[in-house]
Every structure is written in structure tokens, then in C-alpha cells.
Image (tube, coloured by chain):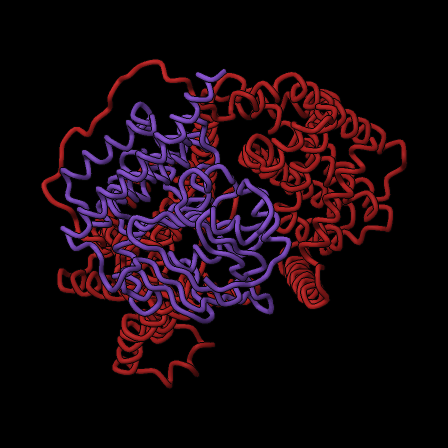
Amino acid sequence: MKLDAFHKMMCYNYGKIKKLILKLTVKTSKQDKGYIQGGNNLLKVSHLKKQYGKVEAVKGIDFEVKPGEILGFLGPNGAGKTTTIKICSGLLLPTEGQVNLCGYDIVTNPTEAKKHLGYVPDDPFLYDKLTGRQFLNFVGEMYGVDPKLRIERIDYLLDRLDLQEKSNELIGGYSRGMKRKIALMAGIIHQPKILLLDEPTLGLDAVSAKNAKDIVKEMAYKENTAVLLTTHVMEIAEQICDRIAVIAGGRLVAVGTLEELQKKAQKGTTLEEVFVNITSESDPVQG
Amino acid sequence: MNTLKLLYKNQWSMFINRYFRTRNKGIVNILIACGILGLLSLGVYFLNTKVVGRFGDFPSEQGYAVATVMYSVVFLLIFAFQFFASLLGLINNFYQSPDMGFLVSKPLNSGIILIYKLLNHTCNTIIKEAIFFVPVVIALSISVQANAVFYILMPLIYFMIATTAASIGVSLGILFLTKFSIKSYRYFVNTGNFLLTALVWVFIFFGVKAPSFIPLEDIFKWLFNTAYLYLIFPFISGGELLGKIALGASPKELVMPTLFLVGVTALIVIATYCIAKKYFYKGWMNSTPVEKVKTTNKKVTNKKTPERNLTPILCMVKYEWIRACKNFDIMVGSLVFYALYSLLVYFTIKIGSRNPLLFSALAMAGGIFLVTTGTSVPFESSEITKNPLTAKYQHSLIKFMPVSSQEVILSRIIMIFIPSIVILTIGLTISSIFLQLTLIEWIVIILIQIFITTGYFYMSQSVEMIYFQKYFESNKFIGGLISFLIIPAYLLLTIGLYVIYSIELRFLSNLQRFLNLPLIIVIAVSTVIVQITYISNIGKRAWDKMEF
């Protein structure tokens, strides 16, 4: 029994230590390469509002994501998560407020802003008459990824997500999970500085979901990418997010690390309990 | 039965929610329905006065006999259309219908689900085709001055004939899909449909007769000389039944066609149900994509590494072309438009020698519409047949990429423009050769065609972007009307004025007085320039404002 407990403790700490080492490495390299542009935040959302007719889906939210940080966006259904992420990606226009990607405003300078962005929607549109490999080449070429690097990166990602064998088949014949994998690969093929993920593990099997999570962590800690992800799976938020933003009724009700949220909620130890407490209170706090 | 009732109650709720959710929506939809009914009534009036009204001139019995034949011919057309519509819609209405998975996962009797889907499929195809055929059938009925019984039985007979055709289509489709994949089915049905349509056109316009080894005449003689055998075809028994009712025949005379119509319909529906019950789920299971377990570690790599990247515009054009070339599912749509363009060129050659330039202009106007529409079809996702919203949604992928609105619109223009202009140039060159135009005339009309087509593309792509704006999502009718009217308006201003000016028609003489060649050229050139400058700028802004 004691040995088992010791083993569990070691595994838990190993994960934390690995994360810390990765972060430290990144911090050093980040300073060396001068990654940061326009201040400390790659993604900055200010006073964001979105109205659909009379319905206000997002009611003025502020948050930012730093390089190498993974911000989890949690909230009940219809809270405004997807609307926010769609505005950040340029798929929706804000009614009020600003979204800055690497210092570029997504509304006034969309082309420059999008150069630094990778986006994986929850319901991605893929060209069903292209093969997986052709599609990834297309996306890579659109972002101007060097041909040699592109091929290497495609092979690497196809291997990581177990899709090498099917890569020369038409996407139209893929299962839902395979389509999700292709969408994820398309979102990160160009190694963006900012990565927006809407339910990234939805429809993936356990192994692929783990690989996807690992890839996201690598993107953040090795490549210094600022990651914003929405999820309904609390374990994912607990495992990979550095900070968590809770949105309810279009308002940001809490932002912070898991420990900070635990303190705010006063009761509850797991993220699930904290989330339920916070969203039921719905006390708007701007982060 | 209760399950079926519940399913239809659910469908009724969906119908109400879709069209009458709010008062305003309800009023708009009722007005649209009234508009459609008005158009149908106009259609009936036109057919009745201009086409079928002449039956009244015949002595009564002869008129009714002609009407019976007409009914049979119309029902034959309905039967054929219904049959193909059934085959074409089978995959979307049955195998890949969005609610199929949901229904199968519920504790419902599989037979009930099948009846529900069969009825839905039949009704869907009947409604789609009815808009074309109902005015014809009603116009015919008015022309024979039929009594009340006739009008009560007519929809019933119509429904029975349509159901029979749809059921045969379903049975054949289901049987095909037990052996072949959905992909093969689509190729087979689309190609078959296209070839048959082309064959009908060839028969009608070129007067081609059936090859001598097909003894068509003997088959017809045998059918009609063997007692009641011809009644085995529902469209003939239905036509005869209606003709006899209109004639006021005695009930005794109605027995045989009624027996055959009801009997054959019942037999076919029961057979379809049995076939569907036995084979449908097998085909459905086979058609559901399943992620295969990895068996080998075979590594698939690119054959060659390109040296450098293309520009975003060329990159989009390249991959859109690859995509379009593989889009066999809806390629048949293109072929239909190309076939129509071939016919247009053929008629231009045949009757255009009197005024070659005028007919070349007409071919140009028709050709620009037909060829560009045909070429743009494969660039649409095949998903569009299942979900019309895909037309807009497919742009969402490009929307979050780092490309400007200018690049998006230009790439869309180039990808359709190049193949279109090649086909249009071939068509116009062929007609020019046969119409014996001089080299200078040929060069001029080719250049004019390129110029006008360029403006057309700027306009159509920009209008498409504008159509995808939020406003038109809730005002589809207005959007559709604008998109529908803007094409003839453009063609009228660029080519139509020249046609009006050159054509020798008395009723146009008043209009012709206001026209002269310099004015026509100025209007045409200005129209094209307005599209390239002003309208395309609106299109670019529309892309920037487009939301998903």
C-alpha cells in the first residue's frame, strides 16, 4: 500500500516537475529570441461585447494570455465561450471592445493578426474532396510555411496523431475523430504564436486526446505559444491549463490559477466543485 | 401506429417552428405561399388558354380522348421525374439523413422507422416535383370541364402514381446499395440521369430514332392489343381513369383501370416495404464510416517537395481546382449546364446565319450564364445537397486565415474564370466558324466576351458575398430575388441592349428609337467598369463583415 501511494506521489510530481522544467527552458529561450511583441500579452481582449439582435451574448469581458501560457475558458452552455473565441479568430465581429493578437487588432488589421493565429473550431469545415495531406499542405502554404519544414511538420503531426496511414485518403471518407485530428493539425501546422482551441479533444479517443493535450503543452512550453482553449472537460482544464477563466451569462466571473479559484469559491477542492460554486454564484469579476 | 403518430406530431411541431415561430415570420411565410400560389394560378391560366385550351375545340368525345392521352403523357413524365428524384434523393433522405442515427438509437420498431422514412421520402419528392406538374394537371382538368368527382379523385390518382414511381426508385436504390458503396451509387445514378436527359434532348431536337434492333413498335402493339395489359403501367391506368371520369363514363367502365391502378400501386408499395425491411439496415450499416483499426505501420509520404510556396491567391486556386476535379458527386450539375450551352451553340449555328453578329451576341449572353454556372458547381461542397447552409459555411475555413478580402475575391474569380473562359471561347469559336465570321469579327467578339465575363464574375462573386450577410439569412426571399434579377439585368445592360437594337421585331421599334451604337457601347462598358470597381469593393467589404 505504501509503495503504491509513493508511486502515485512520484507520478504526480513528475508531471509537475516536467511542466516546470519546460517552462523554465522556454523562458530562457524566449528572452534569447525576443519573442514578445507589443508588450507581455500575445492575446489581449478588452471590454469585449457581442450582441445578436437583442440578445447580448458577451457582456464586456477582459482577459489576456501571455506567451507560453495556457488559459482554459470554462463556462456552462451558452455562456459565451464560443462567441468569444470566434471573435478572437475573426469569424465574428465584436459589437464593442477590442481583440489584439500580437499587437494587431483583429478588426482593423485582420490579415496581420491572423498570420500569428492558429484556430481549431469545435465544428471545423474541411475540404472533403482533398486528402488529409493535401489539406494540411494547403493550410501550411496559405500561412507561408517553408515547403521543407511543412512536409516535415505534416509527417510529424500525422505520426503523433496516428493518421499517417490515412493521410492520402479523401477527408470526406474520414470518421468524425479523424476529421477532428486533421482540424487540430491544420490549426498548428504553422506553429502559430497564438492558438485558439474550441473543445480540442471532442470526439477523440483516449490515446489521441492524450497526444493532442501533449501537443498543446509542447506548443505552449516549447514554442512559447499563447493558448486559449474552451472545454467542458474539467480534467483537461485541471491537467493542462495554467490559468482558468470562468464565463457565465456572457460575463467573466473568475480568472486565476486553480488554487486562486479554490480560494475564491471558499468551498470545494476539485475544479468541478469550484466551477459549480462559482457559476452558481455568478458574481461578475473582471480579470 | 402510436409511434408513427408521435413522429409526425414531432414533424408538425418542427414545421410550425420553422415557418410560424413568430407572428412576423408567419405573416411573411403566408405571403410567400400566397405569392407562389398566385404564380401557380398564373401558370394554370397560361397553360389553359395557350396550350391545352384547344381541346375545347374538338368534338367532345375526341377532346376527351386527346385529354386522356395527354393525362397519360403528363403522368408518364411525372412518373419518370418522380423515379429519378427518388433515386437521387435516396441517400440524403434515407441513408445519410441527419435523424437516422437518432431514430435507430431509440427503442423504436425498425419497421415503423422504415415506414416513416419511406413516407417522408415519397412526400418530399412529390412536393418537389409537384410545383412543376400540378399546374399542368389542373390546366388539363379545366380544359375538359371535369365535374367535382374528378377533382376529388385527381390528387389521389396523382399521389398513387407518384408513390409508385418513388417506391420503385427506393427499391432499386436499396438493392443497389446492398452490393455497392454510396460513392458508386452516386456515380451510377448521376451518370445515368445525365445520359438519359441527354438522350431525351437528342430525341427531341435531333429527331434521332431508336435503333432498328429495338422493336419498339412491336412492343407497343403487343402491349395495347393484349387485353388490359397496358393498364399495368400506373401512368396509363391513371390517365385512362381520369379521362373516363371526365367523359362521364359508367362505373362499370371505371372498374378495370381502377383495379389495375390500385392493385399495381399496392403491390409495388408492399414489395418496396419488404425489400426495404430486408436490405435497408444492411446497406445503412455498410454506409456508416467506421474508423479502421491500424494494422500496418506503412508510412505515406509526399512524392516530391515543392521548391517554394505559391502566393495565397494561387494557392487557393490550386487547391480549389484539385477539390473541384474530385467533386464527382455534383459534377453532373455542371454537365447539364454544359449540355445546354452545347445546344445553344448548335441553335446559333443552325439559325444564326441571317444575322451572325446578333446571334453570336445571344449565344454570348446565354453562354456566360450557362457556362459560368456550370463551372462554379463543382466548387461547391457536395455537403450542400444535405445542408444548404454549407454554401456559406465552407468559407469559414478561409475566413480565419491571413488573407485579405481582395485576395479571397480574386482567387474565387480566377478559379472559375479560367475554365469558363476556355469553354466559352471554344463555343464562340465553333459558332463563328460555322457562321463564317471574319477573323477580325471573331477576335472582337472573343475580346468582348472576355471583358463582359470579367465584369460578370466581379458582380456574381460580390453578390454572393453580399448574399451571405446576416440580413439575408433572415430575408432569404429578398436575397434570392436580388441574386436572381441581377444576372439578367447585367446581361441586359451589357449585351441585351445590342440585341434589342439589332433585332427586327415590331414591338421593340419604340425602344429602338432611343438606342444607338455609341450609347449601347457606353452603357455596356460603364456597366462592366462599375462591377470591377464599385460592386467589387462592396463585395470586399461584405467579406470583411461576414460572420460565421
| Residue A119 in sight in this render | yes
Relative to residue A58, is residue B120 depicted above or below? Answer: above
At horizontal 27% and vertical 43% (from top left) the residue drawn is A23
Q: Chain A is drawn in which colour?
A: purple
Residue A265 in the image: state x and y as whole percent. 57, 51
Q: Which sits in the foreground, B69 or A184?
A: A184
Q: In the current view of this chain or complex, which residue is farthest to the right?
A: B251
Q: Which sits in the foreground, A177 or A10?
A: A10
Give the chain ID for the red colour.
B
> Residue B361 is drawn in which quadrant?
bottom left
Relative to residue A94, is residue A208 depicted above or below? Answer: above
Q: In the current view of this chain or complex, which residue is farthest to the bottom?
A: B514
> Residue A104 is drawn in which quadrant?
bottom left
At horizontal 49% and vertical 22% (from top left) the residue drawn is B214
Residue B407 in the image: state x and y as whole percent. 26, 60
| Residue B228 in sight in this render | no
Relative to residue B164, is residue B48 depicted above or below? Answer: below
